[in-house]
Amino acid sequence: MTILKFRIYFEEDESVYRDVVIRHTQSFRDLHDAILKAYEFDNKHKATFYRSNDHWQRGREISLEKYDKEYKAAPLIMSETTIGSEIRDPNQKFIYQYDFNKNWTFLVELINVTKDENPKISYPSTVRTEGIAPSQYGTKGLLGEKFADVEEKYDLSGTPDGFAEKDEEGEDLGVEEEGAAGDEEEV
């Protein structure tokens, strides 16, 4: 059985990528699910692959389903199309687009072909992870959820006691000094 290894780059940062191994007889639907799992995305949105060339130009579309849009040629359907049937050269490239509103785009490049199937691996599988994946909804930082707990516990958003906020000209903004009773003006 032929095993294909794809490197899936996050389009906006090539230092963020995942390597996924998959059998050539598996479908693009399997690859779609593997990419979402590798990047910790949910499976709630529309998606499509485009066969591509060395210049990352979009070619034949391999879609999750047929969408209500105009096509130059009817798309292939992911669940009906095996990956091996769309490999045209040893460095085959695909563009994977997920969630057409957020427009997540990944560059998928075939980096290895082997006949050796590893009996310890359940295909498809992520075999390498580099960089911090983008957060599908909102922000995901290095500190994660622990920092949110600290923020809630210590209320890091307010101005500390004894410090005043200033506007652009350096004037104090509405911070009253204690012990200055009787000096207040009525507005």
Image: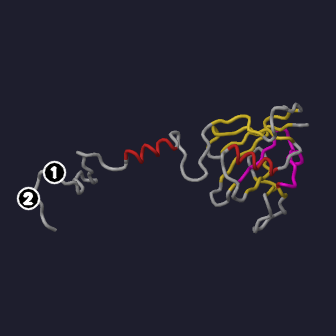
> Along the horizontal axis of the image, is 58 left or right of 89?
left
> Along the horizontal axis of the image, is 15 left or right of 20?
left
> Along the horizontal axis of the image, is 152 left or right of 2?
left
91 in magenta:
yes
SS at badge 1: loop
Quadrant location of the C terminus in the rendered image: bottom left
At label 1, which amino acid type do we have? Glu
Quadrant location of the N terminus in the rendered image: top right
Q: Nearer the viewer, residue 103 or 175?
A: 175
Pointer 2 residue: 182
At label 2, which amino acid type do we have? Gly
SS at badge 2: loop
Residue 102: x and y in percent read: 62, 57
Residue 180: x and y in percent read: 11, 53
Residue depicted at x 55% and y 52% = 138
Residue depicted at x 24% and y 56% = 173
Outermost residue, left side: 182
Pointer 1 residue: 178
182 in magenta:
no
Spatial CA span between label 2 and label 1 = 11 Å
Q: Estimate how packed mark 2 is, as few (under 14), some (14 to 19) or many (20 or more) residues with alpha carbons within 10 Å.
A: few
Which contiguous range is marked in magenta? 79-97
